[in-house]
Image (cartoon, grey):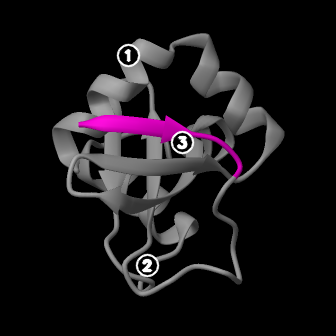
Amino acid sequence: MNIIFGKLLQDGKLTPTSGRIVIYKNFIDISRGLSRDHNDLLRSLAARYKLNKDDVISNAIRLYWDYKNKDSIIASPVRKLDEDMYYAKQDFHNALIGNVV
């Protein structure tokens, strides 16, 4: 799976095929469609893996994503901090995302 990372997607302009991704350390959760927001995903991730909810909410990466074509997705950071954290371990984050999409 090819991941195109950049500021191409943003809230308010998402399509029904768009979704959200949250990454905390080596844990990841993803939504498909517009039904779940980042806060819902973060709380769900913390509960599923018995992680400290406040740490997850404060320190997780938040992304929007959508399909570009059958072999590629677009992933876009929500905040500048998300972009910086993503690039700090880009190969690791690409592998996590590639495994769940």
Q: Is residue 96 above or below residue 33?
A: above
Q: Secondary structure at mark 3?
A: helix
Residue tagged by mark 1? 92
Q: Which residue is drawn at the image coordinates 78% and 47% (left, top)?
A: 79
Q: 77 or 1, which is in the foreground?
A: 1
Residue type marked 2:
Arg
Dividing the picture into quadrants, the one containing residue 36 is bottom left
Q: 66 or 32, which is in the foreground?
A: 66
Q: Is residue 9 above or below residue 90?
A: below
Report how many numbered discs are placed on residues in the image: 3
Left or right: residue 70 versus residue 84 is left
Residue type marked 1:
Phe
CA–CA distance between discs 2 and 1?
24 Å
Q: Position of residue 45 (x, y in %)?
A: 35, 52
Instruction: Find out whether residue 6 is within the magenta segment.
Output: yes
CA–CA distance between discs 2 and 3?
17 Å
Q: What residue span does the magenta drawing correspond to?
A: 1-7
Q: 26 or 11, which is in the foreground?
A: 11
Q: Which residue is drawn at the image coordinates 29% and 30% (left, top)?
A: 96
Instruction: Find out whether residue 92 is within the magenta segment.
Output: no
Label 3 crowd (10 A; few <14 / some 14-19 / many >=20): some
Q: Secondary structure at mark 2?
A: loop
Residue type marked 3:
Val
Residue tagged by mark 2? 36
